[in-house]
């Protein structure tokens, strides 16, 4: 009987996340994003003309028993929107998966297409918005439409202990969704007067529910080409995550 209960606990997050990802993939809540993602998938770019684009909301993926959650902004128009997997097939993903591999959270340093053998270890990857937005800028309403998906992921990832937020928007979204440990302890009036934690690369914030938030610059070309984010800097973020997980 004990083995049966253990197996049920093991399967439950996986089953719940599978159901949730199916709902994400079928979502049509944001007309602007639906139009954009489908137009990009139809028109493509020259270097990917011979490929079939995913062109739908991109689900989250990873280890359902993960203690580490990585939160990005949104799928890239010709990355995740093409391949159907977040951070797969674009330069941001190249940086991210090399860092995850070096930190032991991934079995390989590349993520090129779904079914390429990539497996995450103790790590799950999601996004603030699951559709590729024009100019990489989702609206406030679009963020709010996707927020229930993220809140459910927080509940389904029952072993969650560390969140790495890639970029300011992901950082702010986590704080708005979980809140800091100090806010949990304070009454409403005191919490309203307390300044919100500010985004800074490698910042560490204690959240409610015993979760720690670590901030990182997003590995976008805007940051990596200019040297604002270097590979040693990104490695340090995941080294910190390892330390926090023990």
Image (spheres, helix red, strand yellow):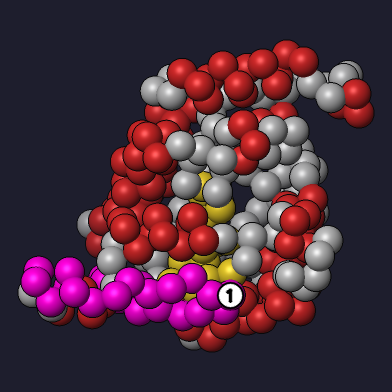
Q: Residue at x 61, y 23 (%)?
A: 37
23 vs 232, nearest the viewer: 232
- Quadrant of the image occupied by residue 148: top left
Q: Residue at x 50, y 21 (%)?
A: 32
Q: Residue at x 87, y 20 (%)?
A: 49
**Which residues are the magenta region?**
188-212
27 vs 102, nearest the viewer: 27
Q: Secondary structure at mark 1?
A: loop
Q: Is residue 37 above or below residue 240?
A: above
Q: Quadrant of the N terminus?
A: bottom left
In percent of width and height, residue 204 lies at 46, 80
> Does the magenta run of residues contain 34?
no
Horizontal side of 232 relative to 151 (left or right) equals: right
> Which residue bears the numbered disc 1?
201
In percent of width and height, residue 109 lies at 79, 60
Q: Is residue 189 above or below residue 123?
A: below
- Quadrant of the image occupied by residue 21: top left
């Amino acid at each position: 009987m004990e083995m049966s209960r253990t197996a049920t606990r093991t399967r439950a997050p996986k089953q719940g996340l599978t159901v949730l990802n199916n709902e994400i993939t079928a979502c049509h809540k944001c007309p602007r994003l639906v139009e954009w993602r489908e137009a990009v998938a139809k028109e493509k770019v020259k270097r990917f003309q011979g490929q079939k684009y995913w062109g739908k909301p991109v689900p989250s993926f990873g280890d359902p028993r993960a203690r580490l959650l990585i939160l990005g902004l949104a799928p890239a128009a010709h990355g995740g929107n093409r391949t159907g997997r977040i951070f797969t097939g674009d330069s941001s993903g190249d940086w991210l998966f090399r860092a995850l591999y070096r930190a032991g959270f991934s079995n390989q340093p590349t993520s090129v297409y779904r079914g390429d053998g990539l497996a995450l270890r103790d790590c799950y990857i999601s996004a603030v918005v699951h559709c590729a937005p024009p100019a990489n800028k989702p609206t406030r309403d679009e963020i709010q439409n996707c927020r229930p998906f993220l809140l459910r992921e927080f509940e389904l990832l029952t072993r969650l202990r560390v969140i790495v937020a890639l970029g300011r928007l992901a950082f702010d979204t986590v704080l708005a969704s979980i809140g800091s440990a100090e806010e949990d302890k304070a009454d409403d009036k005191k919490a309203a007067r307390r300044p919100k934690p500010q985004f800074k690369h490698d910042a560490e914030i204690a959240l409610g529910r015993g979760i720690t938030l670590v901030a990182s610059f997003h590995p976008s070309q805007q940051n990596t080409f200019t040297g604002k984010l270097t590979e040693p800097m990104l490695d340090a973020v995941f080294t910190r995550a390892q330390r926090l997980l023990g």
